[in-house]
Image: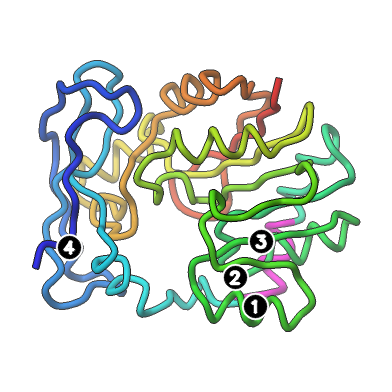
Amino acid sequence: MNYRTNYKSCPLCESLSFYPIYKGDCSKHILYKKDLPPIMQWMECGECKHHFIEGYFNEEGIKKVFSNTHENQKIGYQIEQQRMVSSRIVNKVIPFKNSGIWLDIGFGDGALLFTAQEYGFKCIGTDLREENVKIMKNLGFETYCENIENINFNNKISVVSMMDVLEHVPYPKTMLNIVSNILEENGIIVISMPNIESILWKIMSQNNKNPYLGEIEHYHNFSRTRLYKLLNDFSIEPIHYGISERYRACMEIIAKKI
């Protein structure tokens, strides 16, 4: 069975000009399952220079990958340490937005939602792992096991966080368009993901020790340059660049809807 659907064009600029650049092996990944393709072929767009996987998982592939959960994606993982990491994220947002509704897309271990609530935000979360959503609901949080395009939000959102999420989405433009529409005026977006322009990324790749090339859940490898251009396409202006504490070689962007 074929568990991936190949891209016919660049998922960001829709160019038909793209070519293979490097391969990764995901067979040792904790979420890897027998019958899934072990080799990940990465492509580069000849027009916009974006890096993306040859094909994204179809419904059957997603079921296989999501049948397990990373330990660090379970609710309450290292809750005290992650509370501190999350507090530094919230503190970066506070100068631009200090109240309102905070939507965390792909909330994972729940730490950012816990912490944003502690700061006084009304918190909403989405995650595709049913058990995580069930646990958060039992803790009193408004959470959904749905893609955001299937959710009707009653009010405009003040802050949207996508922490290591956009690289998991087959078509990031679709998600950013929805996010832009649900944000209130001057709403804030927080995004983290690996940065292929970082020196650390380049050193890991040169030494054949780049874990992201075999990261089974990822469909994209973004550069800071390409991410900024993509955000600007949706009238989202980056206002702060930082280094993410969540994972290696990651960037953390604060941006504002304009």
Whether the residues at callouts 3 and 2 have beta carbons within 8 Å, the answer is no
Residue of label 2? 109
Label 1, label 3: how far apart the Cα atoms are: 15 Å
Name the mark nearer the viewer: 3 or 2: 3
CA separation in Å, label 3 and label 2: 11 Å
Disc 1 packing (10 Å; few <14; some 14–19; many ≥20):
some
Tell me the distance, in whole angstroms, between the alpha carbons under discs 4 and 1: 31 Å
The region drawn magenta spans 77-86
Task: Give me the disc on residue 125.
Answer: 3
Residue at which label 4 appears: 3
What secondary structure characterizes most of the magenta part? helix
Residue furthest to the top in view is: 47
Tag 1's secondary structure? Answer: loop
| Residue that numbered label 1 is attached to | 76
Residue type at tag 2: Asp
Q: Amino acid under label 4?
A: Tyr
Three-letter amino acid code at the position of disc 1: Gly
Quadrant, the N terminus: bottom left
Q: Nearer the viewer, residue 91 or 31?
A: 31
Task: Describe the element under mark 4 as helix, strand or loop.
Answer: loop
Residue 21 horizontal side relative to residue 90, left or right:
left
Q: Residue at x 33, y 52 (%)?
A: 218
Query: Residue 29's x, y, as percent?
Result: 26, 69
Residue found at x 30% / y 19%: 48
From the image, state whether disc 2 or disc 4 is nearer to you: 4
Q: Quadrant of the C terminus?
A: top right
Evaluate if marks 3 and 4 touch, with contact meaning CB atoms under 8 Å apart: no
The answer to if 78 sits in the magenta stretch is yes
